[in-house]
Amino acid sequence: MLEFTSTECRARYEKNRRAGALQLCSLQVNDHFSSTDLMALLSIKSLRSHVLRLLARTRPPAGIELLSYKRDRSIIFICLQEGGYRVIERGFVQQDCIVEASALSPLLKTLIRREFPRSHKVRLLKFSSMAGIAENKYN
């Protein structure tokens, strides 16, 4: 069930759904993520700058998850109280590390190239807590 933040958002969603393309429209999605705010398909070309901009505005314990189109590979960025980020990579490489904000940009570039080598579009999911991430299955 979708809950919309405005009637304008609902109208855009219905128009895009009828056209067969769901676009970013700041919708609330009630599923196993708690307080999910944003889910979108983004171009791989603009992904790095968009993620860095979103992470700069994110407050702990919120974060961002990047998913392949098929949702079989992901990169999760979680904002930490100390000012750094916890990065969890699930895909070709399984790793979990903590990085400072200054080292995030080059790391993000490497992770995008490694996890999404042939992708043109990547799913972006913004969440407000870690509840549901560990047991999430992308069926």
Image: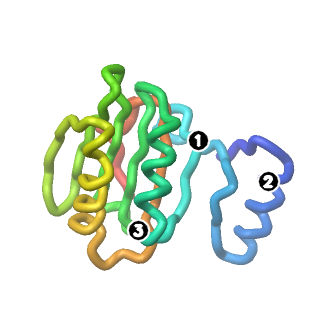
Of residue 89 and residue 107, the one placed in the foreground of this image is 107
Asked if 3 appears above or below 130 in the picture, the reply is below
Q: Residue furthest front?
A: 102
Tell me what residue is drawn at x 49 percent, y 55 percent. Answer: 50
- Say whether disc 1 or disc 3 marks the residue closer to the N-terminus: 1
- Colour theme: rainbow
Residue 37, label in figure: 1
Quarter that holds the C terminus: bottom left
Residue 10, label in figure: 2
Residue at disc 3, secondary structure:
loop
- Say whether disc 2 or disc 1 marks the residue closer to the N-terminus: 2
Tell me what residue is drawn at x 74 percent, y 60 percent. Answer: 13
Q: Position of residue 106 (x, y in %)?
A: 26, 55
Q: Position of residue 87 (x, y in %)?
A: 26, 42
Of residue 107 and residue 2, the one placed in the foreground of this image is 107
Asked if 105 appears above or below 88 in the picture, the reply is below
User: Would you say 7 lies left or right of 75 here?
Assistant: right
- Say whether disc 3 or disc 2 marks the residue closer to the N-terminus: 2
Q: Which residue is the site of mark 3?
A: 69
Q: Amino acid at mark 2?
A: Arg
Residue at disc 1, secondary structure:
loop
Given contact means CB atoms under 8 Å apart, are the residues at marks 2 and 1 in contact?
no
Residue at disc 2, secondary structure:
helix
Tell me what residue is drawn at x 79 percent, y 68 percent. Answer: 15
Q: Amino acid at mark 3?
A: Tyr
Q: Mark 3 to mark 2: distance in Å?
A: 24 Å
Q: Residue furthest top?
A: 81
Of residue 4 and residue 32, the one placed in the foreground of this image is 4
